[in-house]
Image: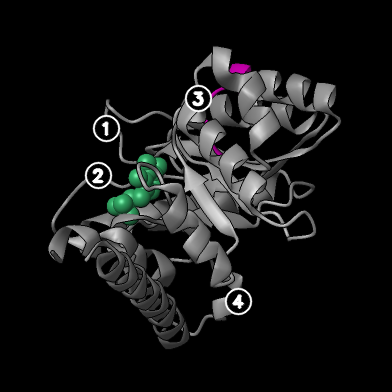
Amino acid sequence: MQNLNAISSSDSLTASYHATLAQIQDVAERAGRTPDDITLIVVTKTQPIEAIKHLYKLGHRHFGENRVAEASTKIDMLLGQLRSNSIPPIWHMIGHIQSRKARTCASLFTHIHSVDSLKLANRLSRFSSDHGTTASVLLQCNVSGEHTKSGFAATNTATNTSQWSDLASSISQMAELPNLNIVGLMTMAPISNNPETSRPIFRNLRLLRDQITQHFPQLPMKHLSMGMSADYKVAIQEGATMLRIGTSIFDHRHTKQ
Ligand SMILES: *Cc1c(COP(=O)(O)O)cnc(C)c1O
């Protein structure tokens, strides 16, 4: 019985993974976008190593975690189980990073979406230099203004000149840091039953990216990390290049017995 359950559960994971990829392609094409410009990051927090390995074997490479300690265990375990000549998975840190975890974070992740202060950027730069690596980072922006959200204050950067100059000053300092490439912006929309409530948040993140690119043409600000299970289709329509999706890929575990 257990084997049967394991098989049906991995079959349904395969199916929901492929269904998600198909949805992304469909929405992208309808929006006039190239699906290749959009990276699906499968968010594997709380998921067992077997599920990650299963997706890896299907050819998936981009995975996201939100806690350094949990990620550390899983990243090591997965590496230990892959053949030594395998292409390593690409790990994205998407959760809030405490200062004291910055060193471990820099050693585990090549992509860090949750850089929310100049201080954290400084630490990540220093630790990446120590490791001889370069981190690709995204600046987490609080576009919605919710107090519970971390990120650079960015509710009104188009018209609030003091908010814009604070952000611009942080960016110009971060742009000088060694072993750190700023590759884009990340945001989270408020939780809602209606994906349309995310649209203005995502649109404003894109406009902010354009504003930053205008002032800092030397920065390769290509990426917009936005869109989760509930609102990724809207995010694609608004220009997302990285989607962070967990629940809608793994949820079959809860809905099927
Ligand atoms: C958990 C998480 C996600 C994925 O959310 P789902 O609703 O499970 O798709 C995306 N981004 C961040 C920062 C998360 O913590």
Q: Residue at x 60, y 72 (%)?
A: 37
**For marks 3 and 1 on the same chain, the one whose residue lies earlier in the sequence:** 3
Mark 2: few, some, or many residues within 10 Å (few <14, many ≥20)? Answer: some
Dot in front, 4 or 2? 4
**For marks 4 and 3 on the same chain, the one whose residue lies earlier in the sequence:** 4
Q: Are marks 3 and 1 in contact (CB under 8 Å)?
A: no
Colour style of the rendered protein structure:
one colour
**For marks 4 and 2 on the same chain, the one whose residue lies earlier in the sequence:** 4
Residue under pointer 3: 97
Estimate the spatial distance between the alpha carbons at disc 4 and disc 1, rounded to whole Å: 32 Å
- Three-letter code for the amino acid on which mark 3 is drawn: Ile
Q: Residue at x 25, y 66 (%)?
A: 5
**For marks 2 and 1 on the same chain, the one whose residue lies earlier in the sequence:** 1
Estimate the spatial distance between the alpha carbons at disc 2 and disc 1, rounded to whole Å: 8 Å
Q: Are marks 2 and 1 in contact (CB under 8 Å)?
A: yes
Give the residue furthest to the front: 1
